[in-house]
Image (cartoon, rainbow, N blue to C red):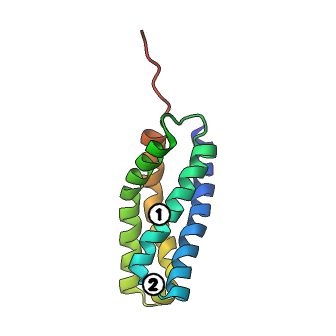
C-alpha cells in the first residue's frame, strides 16, 4: 500500500510540476510577470491540481469532511513543502542566472526539495485513515 501511494504521489507530483512550471514559464516569459510573484500563482495552480488527483487516486477512500475544508488543510500543509520549494527556487534565481530565462529549472529543483515533506503531510494529516472508534 505504501509503495503504491509513493508511486502515485510521484506521478501526481509530475503532473503538478507540469502545471507549476508551465504557469510560471508562461507568466514570466509571455507576460513579463516578476518571477517571484509568478511562482506564487503557479504554486496555487499546481497545489490545487495535485490535491484533486491525490484525493481521487493516491489516497482514495482516505478522505473525510468537506472538500473545501480538505483543500484548505491541504494548501496549509503544502506551505511547509512550499517553503523548502520556494527557498530552493529563490536560491536558484540568485545563484544561477540561467533560471531568470528558464524559471522551470528552479521549479524542478524546488519540487524535489519539497516532495518528501508534502508526502508525509498528505499521508499522515490530510488523507489519514480515520481511527476506528471503540464504543
Residue 92, quarter of the rendered image = bottom left
Mark 1 vs 2: CB contact within 8 A: no
Marks 1 and 2 sit apart, C-alpha to C-alpha, by: 16 Å
Q: Position of residue 27 (x, y in %)?
A: 51, 81
Q: Is residue 120 visible?
A: no
Q: Is residue 25 above or below residue 49?
A: below
Q: On the rendered structure, is 101 left or right of 40?
A: right
Q: Is residue 27 above or below residue 49?
A: below
Q: On the rendered structure, is 79 left or right of 13?
A: left
N-terminal of the pair, mark 1 or mark 2, is: 2
- Quadrant where the N terminus sits is top right
Q: Is residue 64 above or below residue 131?
A: below
Q: Would you name the residue on which mark 1 appears?
A: 44
Bin the neighbour count of mark 2 within 10 Å (Cα to Cα): few under 14, some 14-19, many 20 and up: some
- Residue 59, label in figure: none
Q: Would you name the residue on which mark 2 appears?
A: 33
- Pick whichever, 22 or 120, lies toward us: 22
Point 41% across, 46% down: residue: 73
Amino acid at each position: 500500500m505504501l509503495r503504491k501511494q509513493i508511486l502515485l504521489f510521484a506521478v501526481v507530483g509530475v503532473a503538478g510540476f507540469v502545471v507549476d512550471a508551465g504557469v510560471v514559464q508562461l507568466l514570466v516569459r509571455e507576460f513579463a510577470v516578476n518571477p517571484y510573484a509568478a511562482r506564487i500563482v503557479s504554486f496555487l495552480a499546481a497545489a490545487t491540481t495535485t490535491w484533486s488527483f491525490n484525493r481521487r487516486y493516491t489516497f482514495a477512500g482516505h478522505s473525510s469532511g468537506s472538500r473545501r475544508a480538505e483543500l484548505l488543510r491541504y494548501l496549509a500543509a503544502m506551505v511547509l513543502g512550499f517553503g523548502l520549494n520556494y527557498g530552493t527556487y529563490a536560491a536558484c534565481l540568485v545563484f544561477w542566472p540561467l533560471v531568470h530565462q528558464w524559471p522551470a529549472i528552479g521549479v524542478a529543483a524546488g519540487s524535489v526539495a519539497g516532495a518528501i515533506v508534502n508526502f508525509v503531510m498528505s499521508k499522515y494529516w490530510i488523507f489519514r485513515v480515520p481511527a476506528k472508534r471503540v464504543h
